Image (spheres, rainbow, N blue to C red):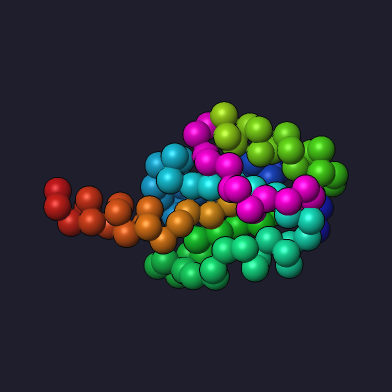
Amino acid sequence: MRVNQSEIIDDVLQHIQKCGGDLSEWWVGTAGTIQEGRFKIPDEAENGMPKRVYREAYTPYAADGVIDYLKGLGLHSDPRSTRGSCVFVYRPVAAQEAARAGALTR
């Protein structure tokens, strides 16, 4: 289902808050379709929570607006992005492992 920019941003930020980690540990990009985006990132879950989230914007321009906003908050731009209306956000496994290791040493 296609949603507007503010809904996508809210969904993504809620997902990040549930999963944890600093915003700078997360990556954001676009794909032509949700299916295309799903193949870009392995489907792994941590504590029952998927490490990625997808939302489809109404247009590629709306998706670009979401990307720009999230990058402004500190998320990294995924170099594998292709032009499209599907926004995907994920936290790489390396960032998750580093966060766990830091928690264990505290």
At x 14%, y 48%, the residue is 106
Whether the magenta-drawn stretch holds residue 63 is answered as no
Q: Is residue 87 left or right of residue 45?
A: right
Q: Is any atom of residue 4 visible in this view? A: no
Q: Is any atom of residue 58 visible in this view? A: yes
Image coords of residue 87 (percent x, y): 69, 50
Q: Which residues are magenta?
A: 73-88
Q: Is residue 100 left or right of residue 74?
A: left
Image coords of residue 64 (percent x, y): 74, 38
Outermost residue toward the left? 105
- In this orientation, which residue lies closer to the viewer: 44 or 48? 44
At x 50%, y 61%, the residue is 51
Q: How many marks?
A: 0
Question: Main SS type for the magenta part?
Answer: loop
Q: Is residue 97 left or right of residue 63?
A: left
Q: Quadrant of the N terminus?
A: bottom right
Outermost residue toward the right? 59
Residue 61, located in which quarter of the rendered image?
A: top right
- In this orientation, which residue lies closer to the viewer: 1 or 44? 44
Q: Is residue 78 left or right of residue 46?
A: right
Image coords of residue 62 (percent x, y): 79, 39
Image coords of residue 72 (percent x, y): 57, 29
Q: Is residue 49 above or below residue 31?
A: below
At x 60%, y 48%, the residue is 79
At x 37%, y 57%, the residue is 94
Outermost residue toward the top? 72
